[in-house]
Amino acid sequence: MRQRAPSAAGRRRGAERFAGPRAGAVDFASVSEPLPHEQVRFAHNSERQFAKLLDFYGIAWEYEPRTFTLEADRDGNPVQAFTPDFYLPAYDTFIEITTLNQKLVTKKNRKARRLRELHPEVQIKVFYQRDYLHLLVKYGLEPPSQLAGIPGDPQPLDLLPSPPPPPPTSSAAESA
């Protein structure tokens, strides 16, 4: 006996029971062409899952669209460069996801800090393993067991630019 696929109304009711799509979200059931995250080869599964979350909420993104030279030799050839994982045009923000070992986290932090120094107009956010895992659980992409041993409560996804650091004060101004 052949089973019928659920009607669109049935799919919507099921989706609503599962917290349903939010305003501006992509309804996967109504999309017939591949979603952006299905058309890109990602270097790491965490990047694919993050892109899937962005697609679900209808947030436009670009994967590794730009490489920034952080250091060049005397001839101007790049010696050190940084290619953030995502660019979110609506927020004018680059996102770097780091879910691997601490040595790589330190290296990526150093590169993000150097990028801010050289290009203060560029907004970059680094998402750490704990932030990433909280997002996965919060949005139902991974079971809560993934959070075992990760401290803290899930944090909201904050894509707004960080305020610029306060200007440095000179010691002469402080003594006056």
Image (spheres, rainbow, N blue to C red):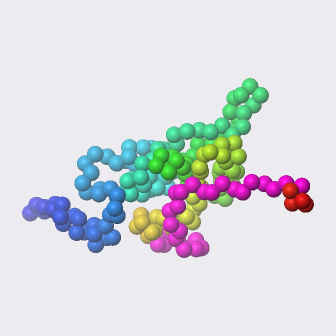
Q: Front-most of 75 and 4?
A: 75
Q: Front-most of 75 and 5?
A: 75
Quarter the C terminus occupies: bottom right
Is residue 99 in view from this perspective?
no
Snapshot quadrant of residue 24: bottom left
Provide residue 151's location: percent of width, then percent of height: 59, 73
**Dominant secondary-structure state across the stretch colored magenta:** loop
Q: Which residue is found at the position 69% from the left and 40% from the top?
A: 70
In the image as oriented, which residue stretches furthest toward the front? 176
Q: Which residue is found at the position 57% from the left and 46% from the top?
A: 84
58 falls in the magenta region: no
Quarter the N terminus occupies: bottom left
Q: Is residue 168 above or below residue 137?
A: above
Q: Front-most of 166 and 114?
A: 166
Where does the magenta region start and end? 144-172
Q: Is residue 119 left or right of residue 156?
A: right
The total of numbered circles placed on residues is: 0
Provide residue 77's location: percent of width, then percent of height: 69, 29
Q: Which residue is found at the position 55% from the left and 48% from the top?
A: 94
Q: Is residue 80 above or below residue 161?
A: above
168 falls in the magenta region: yes
Snapshot quadrant of residue 175: bottom right
Is residue 14 in view from this perspective?
yes
